[in-house]
Amino acid sequence: MELHNLKPAAGSTHSRKRIGRGPGSGKGGTSTRGHKGAKARSGYKKKIGFEGGQMPLQRRLPKFGFKNINRVEYKGINVSTLQALADSKGLTKIGIEELQNAGIISKGRLVKILGNGELTAKLEVAAHAFSKKAEEVIAAAGGTVTKL
């Protein structure tokens, strides 16, 4: 077998349907487009969601919900995460910068400390917000809480 005698498998190729080439071809006249209507015309393009003039689904369904433009979104970090960070890095003060350096939060995020887990280290924690339980857990371990 050489490159000059390669052929496709039998029955795998078909000749192109040549439409609009006269009545003898059997594909003349309307050129397989049927009689009249938008699809028979040149330049036809169906709009997304168009249902043939029936009221489209996205207009039949009611609007609902809203986005609160005053929403403040915090990244929640558990006390157990702070304990793990303090153990691995040997920290006594944990603030936004330490959390960013550890890769726990990204730059510009607001942080809320949550009370899930145990804390044994005496930590000075600085964050934007704290849950009541988190404040209690940090205070119980002998640490301090600073709201930014």
Image (cartoon, helix red, strand yellow):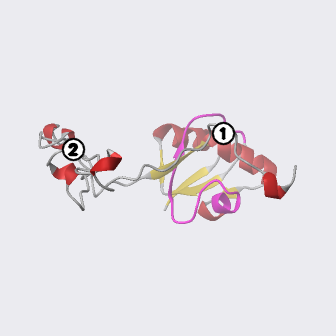
**Residue that lies at the very extreme toward the top in this rendered image:** 117
Q: Nearer the viewer, residue 147 or 20?
A: 20
Query: Nearer the observer, disc 1 or disc 2?
Result: 2
Q: Residues within 10 Å of mark 1 (few under 14, many from 20)?
A: some
Residue 12 placed where, x, y %?
62, 40
Q: Which residue is mark 1?
A: 80
Q: Residues within 10 Å of mark 2 (few under 14, many from 20)?
A: few
Q: Residue at x 59, y 44 (%)?
A: 13
Magenta part of the chain: 98-120
Q: Which residue is mark 2?
A: 34
Q: Is residue 28 visible?
A: yes
Q: In the rendered view, does 64 fall on the left or right side of 106?
A: left
Specify which label sits upstream in the sequence, 1 or 2: 2
CA gap between label 1 and label 2 equals 70 Å
Residue 33 placed where, x, y %?
25, 47
Q: Nearer the viewer, residue 99 or 44?
A: 44
Q: In the rendered view, does 134 fall on the left or right side of 102?
A: left
Instruction: Give the mark count.
Output: 2
Residue 26 placed where, x, y %?
32, 44
Q: Nearer the viewer, residue 50 or 75?
A: 50
Q: Residue at x 62, y 37 (%)?
A: 11
Residue 120 placed where, x, y %?
72, 39
Amino acid identity at mark 1: Ser
Q: Quadrant of residue 34?
A: top left
Q: Is residue 141 visible?
A: no
Amino acid identity at mark 2: Gly
> On residue 142, which mark appears?
none
SS category of the residue bearing label 2: loop
Q: Residue at x 17, y 43 (%)?
A: 63
